Image: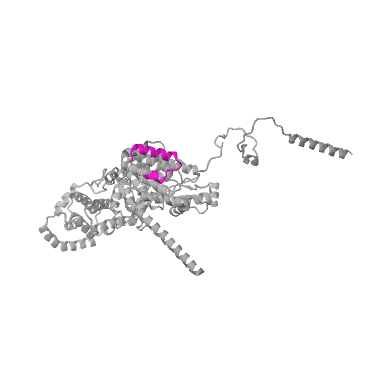
Amino acid sequence: MDSQTTIRNEDSMLRLKIRSYAKEQRQIFRTNATDALRFGLGQIKSEISELENLSAKDVCGLAARIKRRKHATSEDMYRLSHAFLQGNENINTFSGIPGAIQVLVKELSGPNMQRQIDAAECFCNLSLGDGHVSEKITALAGSYLVTYLDGKEERLKRSCLWTLANMLATCEKAAKTLLQMQIVPKLWKLYTAPTDDLNRFQDDAGICLYLIATHAACTVSAVDRRYIVEHLHEKLPTDPGSDYYMYIIYQLNIVCSEEDLSVQQAESLVNFFVGNLKTDWDSSAGGSMRIYYGVRVMANLLAKGDPKLLGCLAEPENFVNALNRLFALQDSNLRYDLMRLLKNFLSLNIVDSNLLLEQLKVYA
Amino acid sequence: MQVSGNMHCQIQNTNKMDSEAASSSSFFTREQILQMLSELPAAGFMKPAVPPSPVLPPFKKLGVLVDADDIIDAKEATGNSSNNNNYINSTQSYLCAECRRTLPTAHLLDLHITEQHDFYFAASVERGDKPMFACYLEECGTKFHTPRQRKDHCITTHKFPANYRFDQDHGKTKPKGSGKKSDASMEVDEVPAARKTVPYIKAFCFGHHTMRTFNTRKERQSGDTLEDVQDMKDAIDDILD
């Protein structure tokens, strides 16, 4: 009798454990699925008509509520997030209320993980606003957003990356401040992290670096550039987000006369470029970015004047094959860059230029 | 020489292919290519263009839509047990085994353990021969002699807020009146430590405030003193006898 009851108890314990495990799994899957739901400013109104319309008055009420209480609750932050998605007026109203952003900062940096995530998502939607809002977020919460890039929590990290991307795209002053917070090495670490289930931030980190290269390349410090040079070889052409790689390298002027490259670093660039040529590139923006900027990076690598840095492209056969494949695209914009590449190669004087030119197939 | 020799062989092989290809589409001749090359700027570096060319599709800013169910689940989870939240915090952040403080990054935890729980570090700081306090940003790598210098560095160089939450000294309040003391103040006798530590306890009551009245109690103090004097007189008398 006793043995039967103990077996029954064990069964129920096991069942409970399995049930709680399944619940946990469902929660994880739901969280991951929720992460994919993204909307532009005002887009939510047209997409989901059932949502309640939150006006600037509601935002004022919510701001007063979170300021009055000890903590901003998850529901309050959820409603604020929705309000920010609905229009720029709501964002401007909230950012104009003294002390309201500070409450969100307090929750973002507080001890409760769930409220940290909610606050980060709130900031993500708040960053859809204009430049002055981005500046405010950067000054008050930028250090925490950058710090959490090294954290463990996936959803928090992702929300921080999305917020940072929005701010980098909006305001140059905010971008400059973020660069002072050493955002570049942190992003590069995420960008070049090995791909596994826990590290799925390469694309988002790549977008942030792409935005820095586009809007704030001149404010990137020499130390940050040096960091990228030292970790060039960590990115592979098959990794996620590798479309941005050559663009970032070129726009940040990583291969230039001032920066010394080791043979290993230069070879990694050459292998990346050759790897791009071997794969079938498409006509999408990502595919063309790899090619256009890859050619320019190679031209600059040749301009350094050291044949040791060329890797497999030092072989004239490989070089001619690569050029012929690219000339065959018959792209007039690309042809100019290819000609610069060819001129830099010929200036190295490692082959007879006449023999090389004989082999080239440049479409008229 | 070997390279040019190989090239010559390849040219012979590819000449046939060239002639075949030329029939289908036209290629630039060697002279034409040389002409094009001469029109280009001198060999050298290509500078990044601002704005970048070719123009790429603009980045679209996106917000995140939170699912209401997640909020409800989170509320339930925190409502059911605070242990659950503690568990999430401990698994998703870095926890100090000594004092149970949670920190968001491994670097900040490293700094915390070194600065708060490492006696060797404390001794090194006391010796003061080299800077020991590392910057809060792992990538910065600068070290300072005092936490104050580090804080100033983080505020001025990295634009951190003055009340940075993960500051190791955050939450430690200054002793009262420490700011008022100046070098010009007059030297006074030190108050004994035991007296210093005794707190001032305000008189409290349980709802019945003390009324201002005449004190009708017998003064015990004076009585005690008189008794002591009497004892003393008796003792002197005994000695004299």
Q: Nearer the viewer, residue B164 or B214?
A: B214
Q: Is A211 situated left or right of A359 in this image? A: right
Dominant secondary structure (helix, strand or loop) of the stretch shown in magenta: helix
Provide the residue span drawn in magenta: A54-78
The residue lying furthest to the right in this view is B241
- In the rendered image, is residue B188 in sight? yes
Q: Position of residue A169 (x, y in %)?
A: 31, 44
Q: Position of residue A20 (x, y in %)?
A: 42, 59
| Quarter of the image with the N terminus of chain B in it | bottom left
| Quarter of the image with the C terminus of chain B in it | top right
- In the rendered image, is residue A127 in sight? no
Q: Is residue A362 magenta?
A: no
Q: Nearer the viewer, residue A77 or A91?
A: A77
Residue at the spot x=73%, y=34% of the render? B219
Q: Nearer the viewer, residue A144 or B234?
A: B234
Residue at the spot x=33%, y=50% of the render? A204
Q: How is the image coloured?
A: one colour
Q: Is residue B235 above or below residue B16?
A: above
Q: Is B236 situated left or right of A235 in this image? A: right
Q: Is A178 situated left or right of A13 in this image? A: left
Q: Position of residue A212 (x, y in %)?
A: 32, 46
